[in-house]
Every structure is written in structure tokens, then in C-alpha cells.
Image (spheres, helix red, strand yellow):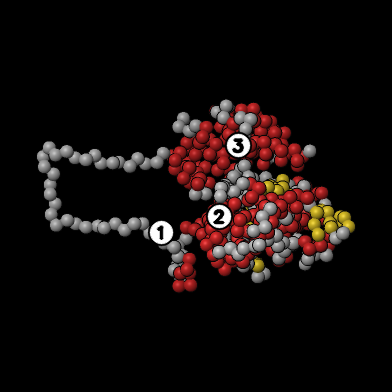
Amino acid sequence: MKRSLARSELEQLSELIAAQMGLHFPPERAEDLERGLDSSAREFGFTDPVDCLRWLLAKPLSTEQLEILAGNLTIGETYFFREPLVFDLLAKQVLPELVQRHGDDRRLRIWSAACCSGEEPYSLAIALQRAMPDLADWHVTIRGTDLNPRFLRKAEEGIFSEWSFRNAPPWLKADYFKPLGGGRWKLSPAIKRMVSFSSLNLVDDVYPSLSTDTNAMDVIFCRNVLIYFSPERANRVIGQLARCLTEGGWLVLSPSETPHVRLPDFEPMEFGGTIVHRKDSAQSKRVTPWSPAEEEWITPALEDPVDWFVPDTITPALPGADLAPVAVETPPSPADEARDLYERGDYAEAAALLETQVSTATGGSDEMALLTRALANLGRLEPALEWADRAAGADKMNPAMHYLRASILLELSETSEAMLAFKRTLYLDPDFVLAHFSLARIFHQVY
């Protein structure tokens, strides 16, 4: 017999999901949470969700448990060219500006964060193919990431049902899909090859990062996912996405989400009633007048109060009395200052400081590696590769240096050289998981 969850048990489950997956289920969404647990319990082999909950709480969640929970707690509500005005804006306003900006290096990087079953990143690939006649002359990266591995498996399969085409333009099926029968459609291999997919948790994973290919993005779509997060987590995600974008890059959110997040690093841009956000780091440095309407967003960072006082009498130190040593704060080294700048997302300032340091005898391989990452996050891949070469040369037996170099080579489409560098990484450390993953991804895409 199925038992109902008590309020305290629901709260435990909510805390577990928030801690392990970043998903936010406030009391008003208790029914959604309980429904998701019911579905998960059946997959885990439980007839009683209460027993399932106690089993889940007994020890840290495994990867399999997280996959099943993610599959039942997130909703895959998407379809091709959802909110078509956004794709019109991409083709008519955003892409022409990016094409002009990248006329020399001919590189475009686009990320669909929380891509669900792939309709959004594939729509982006189709939009680029239609809007750019010389697309074959460009190196285009389109990444799709999601927390839910089931969605990702479906996305990589590239086969969709009629439900994915609701409200889609009439030319879509005829031009880019092959009918399989039974209301199923197979995506064109040419479009499928333009998009790569991987698992990424927007709450727990590290980004921007070369290892997840989330650095130096020109456009990020992050739609209909922030609603699953608490306001604090959502704002933290926005801050990390800002660091993933190059200066002047574009962030596309769902209209229902923008009123509930802070966007200090972005300038809102309206085109025909559609609002997107362009990265403008100077925004966060400007002083915004206080407005009563914005009071709910004000979270002043107050330090602990300090009681300042002047004593009534001051007793002078006696001659010969022992004096306590005065602690002198050591100023941070240039390397520490550069790391602080990097962690704050100030990649240009970090790179400038590091370039000065590594050109002297004070800079070692660690500083060279950090400079490499800063330059890569700015989209400056050629100089990043130069410093990656120097870092690997300075510390030849360090697998992390060779992995970093391999990641830059891969972004530059130097696939053969990248494979050799990944293999060198594994020669030095056979258990380097990311190098194994990167090589597998290359074989999957190329061979």
C-alpha cells in the first residue's frame, strides 16, 4: 500500500535534490516533487515512495540514481524553433554583428545550456546554415549540454516525433529531415554533425572551462532552466555564464525568467519586442541610482560592525616594557593577484598581468598555464597555444600541461595534433579521465 509523504520527508527530499542536483522545489511545488519521486520509485523497484526516499537518504547518491531522478524531476518541454522571433533576431541582428567581428579568425562559438533533447541546438545549427552562405568557410562550434542523460541520448540519436515540430516553420521537415514512418523523422547528417552534446550541471560543474568546451562563447541560450533554481543559485549561474561569454557576447533567456534574475554584466537590447542581453562588463562598474522598485534586489554586503571609541585615559607604555609584535600584512604576489582576477572573470586583466610576469624569470609553468586559460577564455586561441606550448615544454612530465595544450589544439581544429597531445597526456597518467573522454569524443565525431 502506498503511503503519503509527510511534510518533513518532503523537506528532506527537497534538501537532497537541491544539494545534489541544484534543483529548487519550494513548498508550492511539493506536488511536482512528490510526483517525481513516485515515478523514480517505480524505476528503482519500490512500490512505496517512502521506502524509496529512505533508501535515497541512506548514502550519497550514485550516478545512476542521479540520472533517474533527473529524468523524472525535469520536464523536457521543447520543440524546434521555439519562440521564432528569437531565431529571426539571431539571423538578422546577432549573426551579422558576429560575422563582422570574427571576419579575421572566422570562428563562432554557440552554447545551448540545458538543451533538453536537442531541438534548440539543432535549430541554432539550421538557422546558421540558412543565414550564412559561406558557412563552410567558418569553424563553428555548437554545444548542447544538459543535466539529464536521457535527454542527451535522444539528442545524439537525432530522431524526433511529430510533437517536436509543433509550431515549426513549414519548410523544416522537407529541407532537413527524412521520414522514418510512424510519425518519426531523422535529422540531416550535415546538421547533426554541427552539434556536439555532453552532460553538464549548471549548479555544480566548473565553467568556463576548456575541459567542458564552455569558454569564449559568442552566444549562450539558457532558456527555461533558471525556473528550477532558487534565486541565489540562478544569479550565481548568470554570473558564471557571463564569464563564459566574450566581451560583446549575447545571452538569450526566456522572457519569463528575466524579471527574476540580476544581470549586472549585461546590457538589455530590444529588437521588435524581443529582448536579449549583450555582455558589457562596464555595466557592473556603473553606479545605478537606487529605486524603490528595485528594493527587493538589494542585498548589501555589510561587514561586521566595528565599535570605534576613544578611551577616557591613555596609559603610556612603561620604559622597557615588552611590546607585542605588530603583524604586517604581506601584499599579494603578482601570481596570486592574477589568480584572483581570473577567478573573478577578469580574464583580460589577468592575462595582462601574467604576460608581464611570465616574460621575466618570476613566471613558471603554472603561471603560463593560467595565462593560457585566460587567453582561451578571451577567444585568443593562437597566443593561447603559444603559451600552452611553453608551459608543456617547461614542465614536460606534467600531464595537465599536455592536456591543456591538447584542448587548445582541438579548439583550433588541429585534430591530429590534439590526438597526439591527448595520448601524451595518457602516457604520463593512464588514469587521466578527461583525456580518455576527449579522445573518445574525437573518435565518435571523426571516425
User: In this view of the protein, which residue sits in the foreground, 74 or 119?
Assistant: 74
Of callouts 2 and 3, the N-terminal one? 2
Above-or-below relation of 200 to 278: above
Residue 438 image point, x, y percent = 68, 39
Residue 433 at least partly seen: yes
Quarter holding the N terminus is: bottom right
User: In this view of the protein, which residue sits in the foreground, 419 or 21?
Assistant: 21
Q: Mark 1 = which residue? A: 301
| Mark 2 element type | helix
Residue occupying the point 41% across, 62% down: 300
Disc marking residue 102: none
Residue placed farthest to the bottom in the image?
Answer: 292
Query: How far separated are the C-alphas under marks 1 and 3?
Result: 37 Å
Q: Mark 2 = which residue? A: 16
Residue occupying the point 61% across, 43% down: 210
**Mark 3 closeness class: few <14, some 14–19, many ≥20 residues within 10 Å:** many
Above-or-below relation of 78 to 384: below
Tell me: 101 left or right of 317. right
Indicate the amino acid at tag 2.
Answer: Leu
Q: Mark 3 = which residue? A: 404
Residue 220 at least partly seen: no
